[in-house]
Image (cartoon, grey):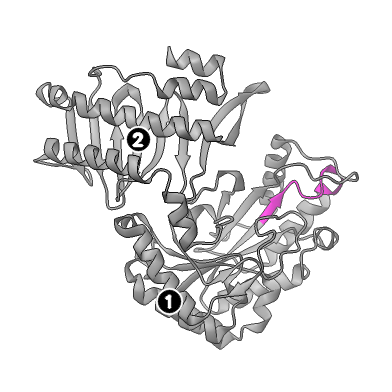
Amino acid sequence: MVHSLFRSFPTWEAFFIMANVPTRSVSPAAVTLGFTAGTVTLALGTRGTLTFDAAGRPRALYENDRYIARGWDGRCLEKKWVSAPGGLFHRRVRSLEAGERTALRDRFRLLLEGFQRDLPALRRARRFRCLDRGRPVRDGGERAAAFAAAARSKLAAEWDTEAADFHRTYRPIGVLPPDQYLSLVLQVTEGCAWNRCSFCDFYAGQPFRVKSPAEFDRHLEDVERLFGPALAGRCSVFLGSANALDVPPDVLIPAVRRAAERFPALARPQPDGVGGVYAFGEATRLARWSADDLRGLRRAGLRRAYLGVETGDPDLRRKIRKPGGPDVVVSAIRKLKDAGIHAAPIVLLGLGGREARDRHVAGTADVLARSPLGPGDMIYFSPVTGTPGRPDETPLTEQERWNQRTAIEARLPDTGARRAHYDIREFLYA
């Protein structure tokens, strides 16, 4: 019945109805409660899967082919692959409205209540198991009952206050690279020093400023207090906000060292590739960094810098008000690599519309091919979102943007640098 509700009424009213549908009694499918270092997952067989952080805060719900994630700032995103004509699929991402967010809370509550009610019968039928990092837990039933009670209590007490706590610690986190979604963001700056690119409004209305050493130290304390046990679910440190490398070397290097002292397990690179310090950078701003300063930054812990290249076509760069030309980008990447810091150029797909797509492909492929990228580096392809709003541009379709990535990649040598998709609509700091 619930499944048909979603198909018939894809609005928040249907979600609200679902949130108040009582859970059934014991499902014939097994139920698993799994603990890792930073996440707790409650898999309710055919009824869905709930995800919590290590502190018991609800983070995601998968049910009836719908995946909904909840962020620290209270926002909730529904993410789903939907079919399109021609057998293609495209990604649908939308933000939940206020009524839907309330319904999501109620659904978490009902599913937790149902699990608590069914747990004794599940244990008798040997259809419940509790795992800690993949290994069976001897006192699994008692641990599961304690977790469910604590999670329900936190759900009631903190659902409406968590976002306020977050905003007391952070300024808005506009976006992160996909491989850093689980990083611990430390805002050594606020806003964007440039903040003039025509395609970006992440930091609109936010004045740029660098935190003083005393402010940054208080920020580190506040972040540690906010996350608490959930720190175990973080995998690295990301220096925010838009461009930490705009901070003068004599300020940024000591700040990175203090962050590494406070969070050594996250800031220290691990053999498996996890850990370390990461940041956005702007190619033209790297001119103020000497080779010695960059090597000092690498020794302090910076592992990779993400550069918004956007396009390698000079005319398009001027059109979108991106500072510097293609040669500046190549030079900046080389400078980072010479200092032992990996680079991650980010390219926009669909920039300039159909009128400029060939120039965009040729110029961007040229810049990337001339850059000394290799193992440890990444190339991100990020589709332009929304409508360009320019009368001289015809937007590319989703498929045409994918084709543009293929055309750029076809011109690149295989240097060992990884390549990945970067859809900014998907970002949620959770």
Residue 196 percent across, percent down from the top left: 76, 63
- Taking the spot 24% from the left edge, 42% from the top edge, the residue there is 150
* Circle nearer the N terminus (1, 2): 2
Q: Residues within 10 Å of mark 1 (few under 14, many from 20)?
A: some
Give coordinates of residue 346: x percent, y percent.
Answer: 64, 58
The answer to which of 159 and 246 lies nearer the viewer is: 159
The residue carrying mark 2 is 50
Q: Tag on residue 382? A: none
Percent coordinates x, y for residue 102 in the rendering? 46, 33
The quadrant of the rendering that contains the N terminus is: top left
Determine whether 376 is above or below 6 in the image.
Answer: below
At label 2, the amino acid type is Leu
Q: Where does the image place residue 304, in percent across and percent down from the top left?
A: 52, 68
Residue at the image point whose x is 63% and y is 74% from the top: 334
Inspect the image, locate mark 1, and give the three-letter code of the amino acid beneath it.
Asp
How packed mark 2 is, by other alpha carbons closer than 10 Å (few <14, some 14-19, many 20 or more), is many
Q: Which mark is residue 217?
A: 1
Stretch in magenta: 347-357
Query: What secondary structure is found at the residue carrying circle 2?
Result: strand
Left/right placement of residue 61 relative to residue 401 reads left
Q: What residue appears at the point 22 percent right and 19 percent down from the top-left corner?
A: 26
Out of 75 and 343, give the one closest to the viewer: 75
Give yes or no for residue 137 being in the magenta stretch.
no
